[in-house]
Image (cartoon, rainbow, N blue to C red):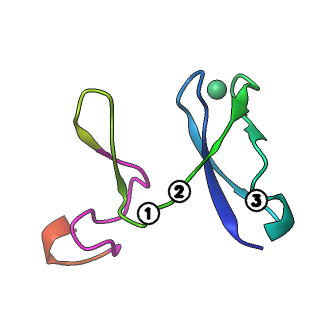
Amino acid sequence: MPIYEYQCLECEFKFELLRPLSRSGEDADCPHCRECSPRVLSTFASFSVTEGGVAAPLGGNSCGGCASTSCGTCAV
Ligand SMILES: [Zn+2]
């Protein structure tokens, strides 16, 4: 099953769900506040731009520059 990414409109929490393709268009319930959360397109770029315009890492342990978990630029 493919993984889809959702973001809550209420608290902006992002989460992923494994779902059959037939349900990919449905909204999900936010695990925090149970608000309806539309699917967002996953971009494999590990960064999202917040309202303040600052790029923030999504995954936490992946290197933003090269989208891999270990490389020269992530200094690990
Ligand atoms: Zn929420």
Counting from the top left corner in percent of width and height, residue 67 is at 32, 71
State yes or no: discs 2 and 3 in contact (Cβ < 8 Å). no
| Whether residue 17 is situated above or below residue 9 in the rendered picture | below
Q: Residue 14 carries which label?
A: none
User: Relative to residue 55, is residue 69 depicted above or below?
Assistant: below
Name the residue rendered at 76%, 59% in the picture.
Answer: 24
Q: Where residue 56 appears, x then y in whole percent? A: 30, 43
Between 69 and 35, the residue placed more toward the observer is 35
Q: Which residue type does callout 1 highlight? A: Thr
Q: Nearer the viewer, residue 34 or 71?
A: 34
Where, quadrant-wise, is the N terminus in this rendering?
bottom right
Three-letter amino acid code at disc 3?
Ser
Query: Is 22 in front, or is 31?
Result: 22
**Figure quarter occupied by ligand 1:** top right
Please name the residue shown 33% across and 34% down the image.
50
Secondary structure at badge 3 equals loop
Residue at (69% x, 27% y) in the render: 32
Mark 1 sits near ligand 1, with its Cβ under 8 Å away: no
Q: Quadrant of residue 7?
A: top right
Q: Where is residue 17 in the image (x, y as percent from the top left)?
A: 72, 55
Residue 65 lies in the magenta stretch: yes
| Label disc, if present, on residue 41 of the rendered structure | 2
Q: What element carries label 2?
A: loop
Q: Are marks 1 and 2 in contact (CB under 8 Å)?
A: yes
Within-10-Å neighbours for mark 2: few <14, some 14–19, many 20+: few
Question: Whole-percent x and y of residue 37?
Answer: 68, 36
Residue 43, numbered circle: 1
Magenta span covers which residues? 56-69
